Amino acid sequence: MDSQQAALAIFGATAAYVWYKRYRTFSISDVPGPKNPSWIYGHAWWWLSEEFTVVEKRILEEYGTISRWNGSLGEERLWVADPKAIHHILQGSNRLYDKPSFIRELSAMVIDWGVASVAGEAHTRQRRAMNPAFGLAEAKALYSCFARCSNSLADKWREIISTTGSEQAEIINVNTWLSKATLDAIGAGAFDYDFGALEETDNKFTKSYANLIFDAFGKPSKGRIFVLDVLAWAPEGTGVWLFDRNKSPGMVRLRENKKCAHEVAAKLIEEKRQELKDGASRKDVLSLLVKANSALRPEIRLRDDEIIAQLRTILLAGHETTSKTLTFGLWELANNRHVQARLRAEITETLGRIRARGEIDFTANDFDSMPYLLAVGKEILRVYPSSPEVQRTPSKDDVLPLSKSLVGLSGKLHEELPIPAGTIVTISILAYNLNKDIWGPDAYEFRPERWLEMNEKPESPLGVYGNLATFSGGHRGCIGWRFAVTELHTFLVTLIRQFDFSLPEDGREIIKTRMGGVAPMVVGEVHKGPQMPLKVTILE
């Protein structure tokens, strides 16, 4: 079958499936939602072309926390930001909902068939093997790696400022440098591997990850969006088949990255196995994973290709997501000078207590005694979730509980919502994190103080951290969330302690584009890719 025949087959199957879903016994057609801008493309293009948070705020204001919207060829989907509904989907439905197969295939294109891509028994088995490497003690043990990399970044910035800056300040594209630093941090902490990104060493593996997601998915055309969308009804494996044959520059880059990553990962796994035989006891994630895996029964043990997939998953999730979170965190601190000043004062005060007890510097345990640092970290994670939404599909018909009654297009009042099996449900993590009923009337604003003022326990507690949807929840909850939080706190303490961050005086405007999550761009310089220029001043 050639590519044209494959496209026609997918189109025909999609049309038949959409017709079936639209006219079956019950559907979500009574749920209000924005008008479909295109029967062919649905809402996807409209959503991707808008700036980060624009669509979420519009739907929240006009339709509330439950809305219907459309995929390609008019297919109906459900958009959810309701806390009770999300809790049911992620945590209360006994795994009735899982990632749609086409989403898992898209994941596999980037990170292989690891824990984020597989489902069912394979997911349970992989997750069980990985759990011992991702506990609280293991996350705190990596603090020294994160501190070393964040201090190396600070040294680089001091060098740049002292060489080119005036008055101890310089405009620095913090996005690029944070990407390098977090790549080094995840290399050291997860694999005991030196990427040399901050030193800009000539490392093929390192270069293969530079702007990978932006280059692969940064500016999708309407045609590509349509193809990706209709994969929802194509036979399983179609996405992988197309990926292996796609000759676009972005897909070629992904395949090159995969080849390079497999070579390096295979070598690292053998090294860790030999260290284990020699009695070495290392605390990096890969060493712990290899050790835990070797103790499992042969029938549930991870194969080498599955371990490699976990490495690729950890690398991408721990690098790209954290660097973007930190980038926007520093931007918010530059915009909200009083927040930056208060955080710096707490850091200074805590350092004084550390010195008073006879120690030199912070430990990961010290972060627990810094309420404003914790508040700032949570607020950054609330406003800038690395994945603005996730998709889930019920394997059989279900009834979705709602926090608020919903008035349907027919006038019928819905206290709960029947969901047909196979419906694609988009959980809007960003809209949940901006929900005023949960976070207060100023939920759209960046205000860390809210975390010091909240006392009531939520009716439908969500996720793994701070009632945030940022790390998802349930059996698909982010396994590395403790590592991400520890790394975020470490970099904030290191950088705010040594530098002041402010907006450049040249008036350059930042827009938040939807490119593999959220990416900062400078107005008029989008062709240059992600940028976040900030004025960085050395503090004495």
Image: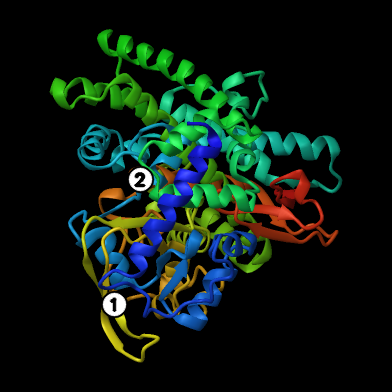
For the residue labelled by badge 1, is the local secondary structure a helix, a strand or a loop?
strand
In which quadrant of the rendered view does residue 180 lie?
Answer: top right
Image coords of residue 355 (percent x, y): 48, 45
139 to 207, vertically: above or below:
below
Q: Secondary structure at mark 2?
A: helix
Q: Is residue 337 visible?
A: yes
Q: Amino acid at mark 1?
A: Leu
- Identify which residue is drawn at 40% across, 42% down: 483
Q: Badge 1: how crowded within 10 Å, few (<14), some, or many (20+)?
A: many
Per the model, the C-alpha gap separating discs 1 and 2 is 26 Å
Task: Give the x, y percent position of residue 1.
Answer: 47, 31
**x and y percent of residue 444 in the render?**
54, 74
In this picture, residue 139 sits left or right of residue 206: left
Q: Residue at x 72, y 38 (%)?
A: 158
Give the quadrant of residue 284: top left
Closest to the observer, 32 or 245: 245
Residue sitting at x 84%, y 43%: 165
User: Which residue, as the protein is rendered here, is positioned at the far bottom?
Assistant: 411
Residue topped by disc 2 = 101
Q: In the drawing, what numbered circle is on residue 272?
A: none
Residue at the spot of label 1: 402
Q: Earlier in the sequence, mark 1 or mark 2?
A: 2
